[in-house]
Amino acid sequence: MNARPLLASLLALLFALTLSGCGPQCAVLKDDHEAFARKFQGGADSTRAPHLSIAMPRAALTEAIDAAAARIPRTPVDLPGLGDVGRYVPNRLEFTPRALQLSVDKADAARLRLDFDVNYDGRALFGLDLTAKAPITVNTSRGTLRFSIRGDLFESVTPRLDEGAARKLADALWGQLPSVARAVVQRGLVDRLAREGIEYLTSRGYALLRERVLKRIGEIASFEMGMPDVPIEALTLTSVGSGANGVFRLDVRTSLPVENGLGESSLSALAAAAAKSPKDALRVQIAAETVTALANWAMGRGKLPSRYDDTGKPSREGGVQVGAAWGGSDARPLKVHLWSLGTPQMCVYGRAAGVPTVEYDAAKGKLAVGIKDSSVEEFKGPALLRAVAFLPSVTQNMFDFSKTIAMKTQLGIGSKTFRVNLQRAAFDGRTFTVDLSTSTAPKSGT
């Protein structure tokens, strides 16, 4: 029997079996890869919890608001109804801005409280508290949140009336009277005129302020926060705490499939840390699952490499396509999926896992990302790829992209833009935290 035809027949049979076995598997793996990539291109269901959050000390806004308050003019106002007494004493009062306070109520409005003192002869008689409600505008396509507080937004006023306001005014008026006038003007008349004057001012104070001050000052303060080009679904600005230790926190939800966002404990810790930070600091916190979701979205948009060669190096022509996932409470939570679909007879799927480590060397300005406890968890097809070789490269790119996202955050207050500089980056196994310092520069066009 001739061995050569038999060998050829066996090889042909083996090739046919290989084709019949690998063909269906290649189709399945290709469908799996397309479905995986498709769900990270926006519009997926996700947790209502924030995917990432940015916190900043209240002082950063307070300084800008104080500067706006300083620009509000002191306004003289005539005190009517003094009659004959008015011939002997000045009848000019002065509305003096005392303080501005900003708070934010959920996502729909920012509230500004503006305090005025009503002064006569250098004495504060009583105060007027005004409240403005400024609508917050969220532009999810541009990734911006903005509100502007103008003088014409103040819609309510509450007199801050001291018990002795009328007495203070009466004493001031009596003190201004020349001795010759006191012989013909009774103190009781001055007391009555002072009470009537205070009653008039408390009832008409808002109208006077609106006409003399608020209509003239235009915009008092403006605030805008810009996010980088990521698929944002919702932005919510809230104030946390009060006084010197208060912070403003911007919570961001993306349109990506993130099932586990930032929990209340993470958000509370974020606000607490920001409250202790310098006034020029920003702290950004990103849920681990958000990091992997953003990486997959970026790969689909060409912002991150999605193809690698068979040694795990990024390559536009590489035959291996990758994706990332987060395994939550798994011992090795970071998952890197690999598909090699270029050769029909050699289709491969693999999943490698590990624990990422993140350190930032501030002196060198370098973010170092590593992997520990790496392992191959699943493999389909001829074992020609060493799946764990892809973990370091994919993970480094993933966290570098997250760092870039944090650093593209911009804050605008009034005529200033606050630009950011990276100070620290860390990963605790659940959240990626980036600490930034801010420096100011004029807004473009100003």
Image (spheres, helix red, strand yellow):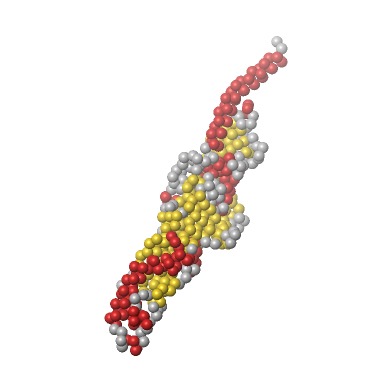
Establish if 194 lies above or below 344: below
Q: Please provide percent x and percent y for residue 370.
A: 57, 46
The quadrant in which the N terminus is found is top right
Q: Please provide percent x and percent y for residue 4.
A: 71, 15
Numbered-mark total: 0
The quadrant in which the C terminus is found is bottom right
Seen from the viewer's position, the closer of residues 31 and 84 is 84
At x 57% / y 27%, what residue is drawn? Answer: 27
Establish if 25 lies above or below 231: above
Q: Is residue 140 visible?
A: yes
At x 62% / y 23%, what residue is drawn? Answer: 19
At x 54% / y 44%, what residue is drawn? Answer: 294
Residue located farthest toward the top when viewing the structure as drawn: 1
Seen from the viewer's position, the closer of residues 172 and 184 is 184
Left or right side of 248 for 348: right
At x 39% / y 78%, what residue is drawn? Answer: 91
Seen from the viewer's position, the closer of residues 104 and 393 is 104
